[in-house]
Amino acid sequence: MFQTYDVRGGADQGRKALPLIRAQLEQLGLDGLFVPHEDEWQNEYLPDCAERLAWATGFTGSAGAAIILRDKAYLFSDGRYTQQALSQTAPELFEQRDLVDQGPAFWLKAEAPAGAKIGYDPRLVPPDALARLKESAAQAGVELVAVGVNPIDQAWQDRPAEPSAEIVPHPETFSGESSASKRSRIGEKLSGDGIEASVLTSPAALAWLFNIRGKDVTRTPLALGSAILNKDGTAQLFVKPEKVTPELRGFLGNEVSISTEPDFVEALKKTSGKRILVDPSLSSAHVFDALHAAGAQVVRGQDPTIMPRALKNAAEIAGTKRAHARDGVALANFLHWFDMEAPKGKLTEIDICKAIEGFRLATGALQDLSFDSISGAGPNGAFPHYRVTVESNRKVDQDNLFLLDSGGQYLDGTTDVTRTVAVGTPSAEMKDRFTRVLKGHIALSRVRFPKGTTGSALDALARMSLWEGGFDYDHGTGHGVGSYLGVHEGPHRIAKVPNHVALEPGMIVSNEPGFYKIDGYGIRTENLQYVTPATPIEGGERPMLGFETLTLAPIDRRLIVVEMLTEAERVWLNQYHAKVLAEIGPRVEADVRAWLEAATAPL
């Protein structure tokens, strides 16, 4: 099984770690240390050896930071993790702060003791974030000091080893384009912009550019490393030598040299006078410092692989359709099983996580989960990013709702789907909120929009029915998804927050409006869909784009107030369910098919 339920960390972890960290600070003559969640590669999911924030504080959320002083400590987390942060950290040791409104930069300016020397690891902080910290520190009379060796790494005596799994080629059958072709066309763009080379430190960029995958990071098939792509399409790849096989060398060919990670710094020293492109949101301040010290002309700009990676080609779209059909079989088997077992009153959230993982494993193609499943019974479903643990594990409530957000990593695609299902008899309120969420989901599925439209411009469509009732949700409506890569992939998204990246054909994005009643229940309906050219509108003046749905799983008809749907909405849902039955029905056993026929019957 991939998912674990005993989350590392907790209050005792912080109690053990803080004295060790403070001893290191004393040796270095520092008054404090800034501890971000991010690792050297700015990953969303971290290898165990990079979980420095969790080791130092006990907090295991995927976003946060800490500032540890000689006599005090502060933990910063956002609204998704407020309760988790409180439960996992020692209250007598950590003061809680909001990461968004009272983040580390705000703390430095408002609360840091004047004259203090606070250390930071330049490998873990992007340059723009560091600039904001330094500006606040200067206003408060505080000195930020770069450390050569992270004090946490020194104090962490049983720190896990760095990952060293072999890197494997990702066949062109799945990628749809050779690495040589990708490197050539991006190199031409660099040359046209007068740039000699681009420094790449994002593992996702390496995975896409070189058509490679790895197992260094949980939930995402990444190999940690760095690269330099030259304008002529040649490249240098810097990874641990034990990750490299003869097969990999042959696959990459003579135009890609492979060196060790320490050689990366030496290569940066040879960039004097050259125009070098680096993405300040993905590369650390350490990389920028090295380039400036070498005398390079640093060009700050977007990683050149981001947009090409977001625009899936025909092979990637075909692959993700296969992956979603395969995943749809697992989902149908799971939802049938759930409907049989949940009324018995014995199922727990962990039982359900194990079950959905088991059905995906039964496909014979699952490589990993795409994220830890969010399995929320009743009030636990009201936390959008809830992760079940042995301590929080709850039985499925009768006459309530159950929310499951889960996904799989397959060689041909990445899936992410949320279904909210009724257990017993749902209340009129539950059905009303569910139908409002569904109306928003359908609106975002059916919309046609002109070229140049961003996800921000579409976000209100998913919220309109909720707004009409005086409701809303606090997370984004849609995130990009990779092709056997990250389940969260930019640069496009659908959210209230302004995004200036237009939606283009080939982009995969989630569609996941929701509603959450604290201490009651949670509702979210999520499909993945991709941008396509839309059928021309008669009499229209402009070419339009639209979405094609990828996810294949029934939406619980028992929770729908049919009278609240328009005719167009009913037609969409009936057509969607007909497609689910047509594609999944022939691939499941007779009892599951009979259940599926009822679950997808026309309204």
Image: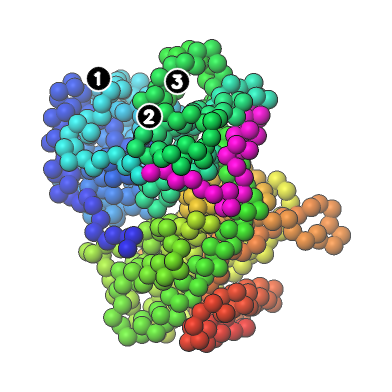
> Which residue corresponds to the image point at 50% horizontal and 52% vertical from the top-left?
484
Q: CA distance from mark 3 to mark 2?
A: 12 Å
Position of residue 81 measured from the top left corner of the image (x, y, whole percent): 33, 52
Which residue corresponds to mark 3?
Answer: 268
Label drawn at residue 261: 2
- Residue density around tag 1, few if under 14, some if 14–19, many if 20 or more, within 10 Å: few
Part of the protein shown in magenta: 166-190
Which residue corresponds to mark 1?
Answer: 115
Label drawn at residue 93: none
Q: Is residue 448 above or below residue 578?
A: above
Judged by depth in the image, the label closer to the viewer, 1 or 3, is 3
Judged by depth in the image, the label closer to the viewer, 3 or 2, is 2
Dominant SS in magenta: helix
Judge from the rendering whether residue 93 lies leftward or rightward of residue 370; answer left or right: left
Closer-to-camera residue (153/398)? 153
Disc 1 and disc 3 in contact, CB within 8 angstroms? no
Query: Is 168 part of what is drawn in magenta?
Result: yes
Closer-to-camera residue (187/514)? 187
Judged by depth in the image, the label closer to the viewer, 1 or 2, is 2
When asked about the image quadrant of residue 394, the answer is bottom left
Position of residue 339 measured from the top left corner of the image (x, y, whole percent): 42, 82
